[in-house]
Image (cartoon, rainbow, N blue to C red):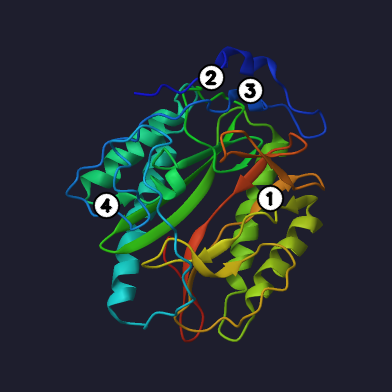
């Protein structure tokens, strides 16, 4: 079995963020995975999404079968039909899981501990953790701490009292995906960090309020970015929300800053809204050598919240609320 290789995690307590952004541990690129672990166990009786390689659970890393992730076209669901029932069911599962994950977040727990809990809970209910095996991603959720914008890989670093952490969960169950995330605050997070989290939470709500039949997909990003700038934050434009259903990622693409994405919001659309707000005026990220972890260029903190929404005849229903 491959063992993740890290540097001494104790040195985190000596790494303070830039003074203009607050005091918190900055995750350096030297802590990126240098080898991947085998994935956590998923019973063979549980159906996998089509993108998971057939030999994903038995092959050494780098020897997985190549699976092409096919591009899917945007397709609205029939309201009141079988698809809506399936989406509501899996959305409730992932919503409840996120609430229980939040109860685990405390100083000393590792993100690997969180990932183990997530995997065991999902599989015990007959579901599959959607990230596991997606483009060979090695874990069952993503955990993004402090200056990590998105796609942090769970590891053995204990959480610190000054940390903020986003946990992003997706479940595949009965043929449908449910997707949500939240950023959690540990007990000694400073005011600047708490302000970032509250602003990000409100930015998501503003994006949701922009979801009405007849509005444009691009209107969501305009509303979110205007709000973020008014409060002294920037919005990362490298990640977007996405259509979701029997496919993990598909159009429409929901950008959280000003954009020219075409298309009109109509009943039957099901997609995620998941803004990443960053302290300061530079929201761009840079990728670690592990191929997944995206961190801020400036070392500033980033926060993210996510909901999965369904557009109805007269508005929007937040499935993961």
Q: Residues within 10 Å of mark 3 (few under 14, many from 20)?
A: few
Q: Residue at x 65, y 70 (%)?
A: 220
Looking at the image, which is closer to me, 71 or 230? 71
Q: Residue at x 27, y 77 (%)?
A: 82
Mark nearer the N terminus (1 vs 4): 4
Q: Which mark is residue 277?
A: 1
Residue 194's place in the image compared with 11, above or below, is below
Q: Residues within 10 Å of mark 4 (few under 14, many from 20)?
A: many
Residue 3 position in % (x across, y down): 41, 21
Q: Residue at x 46, y 23 (%)?
A: 4
Mark nearer the N terminus (2 vs 4): 2
Quadrant including the N terminus:
top left
Q: From the viewer's perspective, is the residue at label 1 or at label 4 nearer?
A: 4
Q: Which residue is mark 3?
A: 30
Q: Residue 296, located in which quarter of the rendered image?
A: top right
Mark nearer the N terminus (4 vs 3): 3
Determine whether label 1 and label 4 are within 8 Å by CB.
no
Residue 320 position in % (x across, y down): 42, 60
């Amino acid at each position: 079995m491959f063992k993740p290789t890290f540097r001494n995690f104790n040195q985190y307590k000596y790494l303070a963020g830039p003074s203009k952004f607050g005091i918190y541990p900055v995750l350096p690129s030297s802590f990126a995975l240098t080898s991947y672990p085998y994935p956590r166990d998923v019973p063979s009786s549980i159906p996998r999404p089509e993108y998971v390689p057939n030999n994903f659970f038995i092959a050494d890393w780098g020897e997985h079968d190549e699976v092409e992730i096919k591009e899917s076209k945007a397709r609205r669901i029939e309201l009141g039909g079988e698809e809506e029932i399936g989406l509501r069911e899996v959305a409730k599962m992932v919503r409840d899981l996120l609430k229980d994950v939040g109860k685990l977040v405390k100083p000393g727990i590792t993100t690997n501990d969180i990932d183990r809990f997530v995997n065991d809970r999902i599989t015990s209910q007959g579901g599959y953790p959607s990230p596991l095996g997606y483009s060979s991603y090695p874990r069952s959720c993503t955990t993004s701490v402090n200056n990590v914008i998105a796609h942090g890989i769970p590891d053995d670093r204990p959480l610190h009292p000054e940390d903020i952490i986003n946990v992003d969960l997706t479940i595949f169950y009965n043929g449908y995906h449910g997707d949500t995330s939240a950023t959690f605050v540990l007990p000694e997070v400073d005011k600047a960090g708490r302000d970032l989290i509250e602003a990000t939470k409100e930015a998501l709500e503003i994006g949701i309020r922009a979801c009405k039949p007849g509005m444009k997909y691009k209107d969501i990003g305009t509303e979110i970015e205007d709000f973020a700038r008014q409060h002294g934050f920037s919005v990362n434009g490298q990640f977007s929300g996405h259509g979701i259903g029997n496919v993990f990622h598909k159009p429409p693409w929901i950008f959280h800053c000003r954009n020219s994405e075409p298309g009109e919001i109509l009943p039957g659309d099901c997609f995620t809204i998941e803004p990443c707000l960053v302290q300061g005026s530079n929201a761009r990220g840079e990728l670690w050598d592990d191929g997944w972890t995206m961190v801020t260029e400036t070392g500033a903190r980033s926060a993210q919240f996510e909901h999965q929404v369904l557009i109805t005849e007269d508005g929007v229903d937040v499935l993961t609320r």
